[in-house]
Amino acid sequence: MGITTDEEHIDTPHMEGELPPTPPETVVDGEERKENEDSKDLTLFPLPPTSNPPTSVLEVDKKTPDAHVPRDPRLIRLTGVHPFNVEAPLSALYNEGFLTTPELFYVRNHGPVPLVEDEDIPTWEFTVEGLVENPITISLKELIEDYEQLTAPITLVCAGNRRKEQNVVRKTKGFSWGAAGVSTALWTGCLMSEVIRRAKPIRRARYVCMEGADKLPNGYYGTSVKLNWVMDPNRGIMLAHKMNGEMLRPDHGKPLRAVIPGQIGGRSVKWLKKLILTDQPSDNWYHIYDNRVLPTMVSPEESASNPSWWKDDRYAIYGLSTNSAIAYPAHEEQLCIVGAPQKYRVKGYAYGGDGRRVTRVEVSIDKGKTWRLSNIDYAEDRYREGYEQNLYGGSLDVPWRESSFCWCFWAIDIPVEELKGAKDILVRAMDESMNIQPRDLYWSVLGMMNNPWYRITISHENDYLRFEHPTQPALIPGGWMERVKKSGGNLMNGYWGERIDGVEPEAPVEEQVTEVKMTKDDVNQVITIDELRKHDTEESPWFVVNGEVYDGTAFLNGHPGGAQSIISAAGLDSTDEFMAIHSETAKAMMPAYHVGSLDEASRRVLSEGEVQQDPSNEPRPVFLNSRNWTKAILHSKTNVSWDTRIFSFKLEHDEQSLGLPTGQHLMIRLRDPVTREAIIRSYTPISETTRKGYADVLVKIYFDTKEREGGKMTKAMDALPIGHFIDFKGPIGKFEYLGRGVCAINAVKRSVKRLIMICGGSGITPIFQVLRAVMQDKEDPTTCVVLNGNRLVEDILCKEDLDVFARDNVDRCKLLYTLTKGPEDWTGLRGRIGAPLLKEHCIKGAEGDTMVLICGPEALEKSVHSALNEQGWPDSDLLFF
Ligand SMILES: Nc1nc2c(c(=O)[nH]1)N[C@H]1C(S)=C(S)[C@@H](COP(=O)(O)O)O[C@H]1N2
Ligand SMILES: [Mo]
């Protein structure tokens, strides 16, 4: 998250009551609007932001049943690789504005995405059956031709939106959505009531059951809503085939889905195949065991052993609960308070349920003692203001409707002076029925409809205010909830786990982690690593959790995460991922699959230095461990150029240092997403060695070309989804720079006056660390000569930083770039790094006063080696990284 210093989120203070400018939006021009050209009263309703439909299938998806679905790599995967359940980073979602592009629209798939070829779209059929006089089958072509088409903006929200907060309090049976399980699109199609009317429901019919084409472990996905709602035009229940004017994308129900405005997303069935009229709610497994808020005292065990909780219709959820979240300040955003503008604009989204309008959004910076009224922008109203017109082949069916089916954006300017004195920012929304978000979180087994006040904390660090959201989605660590919980705070004390003034602090409540027993008593077979490895197969995948061996075969079809996630774990120790993802209920199912215990020796071999959990559970101050693999999480990717990225990894906690001495490297271990083979390479991070909590690694991706296959490791890195674990080990390397000219080679110290650094391409990274260490220490007398070879100017990595070192240290740093394909106006050196260049720029001095550090492709290292030897450099002065 960047540092906010200027106008980015802050505008000049505005008048009381004046609406803040809304996020950028497109104004209709072109075809759709032509007919209205003479009207002066053109309404400026938002059109979708520019979409860049993904065209290629991501590496991670290729071995899954979704290998036919191109996707956007920015989406954060919440349930491993498959099934695809994702949300966009919250700021990215908010920045899209009122309408979300289909590629960033959240996805909730219970299983594989049905494959529907474009040529089969017109003949896609669905039925209307059950309690009707006239059962019918309708093709998509007929639906478009025979039924009145309309287009309307509608927000979908997964009932699990914001569930991570519940999971931090106590693990629910659901995966961890952040606050971006919500998105808005313009949907085109017809009213569901039209097709039902043609089928002539009989009197007894009270419910409309819907069924999708996705075959899941417990049957096809299905649910129901009341027939009465479907027939009510005010509820706007649709059958949609277009999203933002284009055919539905595969993840969003291509070619046809239900869209049920104002209700939880789970009712909007995708890949729609059947509408069945009944006199009872749906008996589909997913209708019964999903999308419910059971009473808070029903524990996971109770809900599992007593199915009647699930059958009680009172606990099914339909209309959304009133909700809101803060988008800016973003998580870990920093506001520089020196020379900051007077006001900071806090902003976010809010929505109500069942078409109820959000009528106020209030913000507090004193823990809810006082509230200030925020401005609300209801972009949805701007579609109402105009008269009926055509958009994407449907009439814009909103002007007459009174309901609010979309999210709204709110914003409020708060004086930075006041933020400086505050510890947190709270937001709550209220709808037109005065339903207001509660202060306290209501925990329930499925963790759904979570809507307490959204709270971000403010901490003061030197000249900065640093903001923290409650959580981060998926397994991504971070957020104040985790921090408070770790330090013993009780998150449910009505005060966000903080101490209440004047009240004796409660003894930190030991979390009631009932250790779920995952083994079977009569299983006592000892299994060796060789036996385990025989089951590294798709047919009978065995995997290891806590040293115990499980046979996943019988569960391949029933696993909610899909067979793929079990197959991916075959033959491996998957303790960390397993324990992190699974609920108590899931763990309680494990004895059924328990086949034996891995013998001691095999455990050691298998973990071959896998993260050894410190039994004391103390946070480790240093991340790297030279004997064991430790895990960090991919936090972000930044494109430096078309083929070069900075991968930022989040260490185990904010205070942890990487533990990499200057000049040394670390190893990164990944699994090839397709073959699952382990790939290990060494890298030198470019982030400062003193940086805490994170490490940045600069990587040039070697893509496949027509001539040759690309780099296994770098392609696999590029395919990594944000939020996933990667293994690290180290430090390694024979060289270390101790400072002030003192180097250690294989731990033998040696003092030098000069360092000559020769590198090519991404070989700059270890060199960069050493150079920075020298240049940052103004007392370090060592002089450095850097000879850096590349093809094009734009291939020179870290050039800006290098140039600054040279500019600020004229007498200590000599920087020489040489290019093989330099542009005409290039004033630096030309040609490869070889004997002639070296003779000129790598001049031997007094005996032993210089070390030459070399890092680059093998060919470069070889030719430099022989050239330097010829020029009289002894091997003892040369160091190859
Ligand atoms: N056929 C089918 N329809 C489905 C689902 C599904 O898994 N299969 N998931 C539901 C849930 S829980 C949600 S929140 C929405 C998500 O829609 P989206 O993926 O287009 O955002 O689809 C709903 N419709
Ligand atoms: Mo959902």
Image (cartoon, helix red, strand yellow):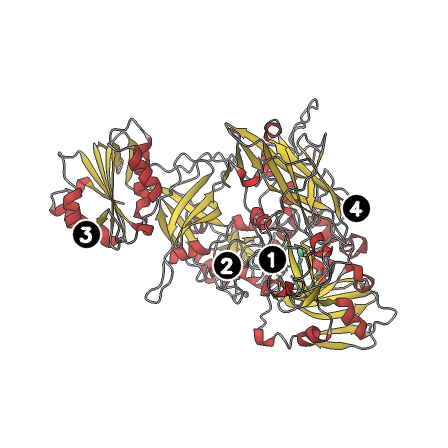
Residue marked by disc 1? 48
Q: CA distance from mark 3 to mark 4?
A: 76 Å
Mark found first going from the N terminus, 2 or 1: 1
Judged by depth in the image, the label closer to the viewer, 4 or 2, is 4
Residue marked by disc 2? 568
Mark found first going from the N terminus, 4 or 2: 4
Label ID, residue 863: 3
Q: Residues within 10 Å of mark 2 (few under 14, many from 20)?
A: many
Q: CA distance from mark 4 to mark 2?
A: 49 Å
Judged by depth in the image, the label closer to the viewer, 1 or 3, is 1
Judged by depth in the image, the label closer to the viewer, 2 or 3, is 3
Residue 782 x/y as whole percent: 24, 31
Mark found first going from the N terminus, 3 or 4: 4
Residue 539 x/y as whole percent: 52, 66
Residue marked by disc 4? 432
The number of callouts visible is 4
Image quadrant where residue 248 sits: bottom right
Residue type, label 3: Ser
Image quadrant where residue 192 sits: bottom right
Mark found first going from the N terminus, 2 or 3: 2
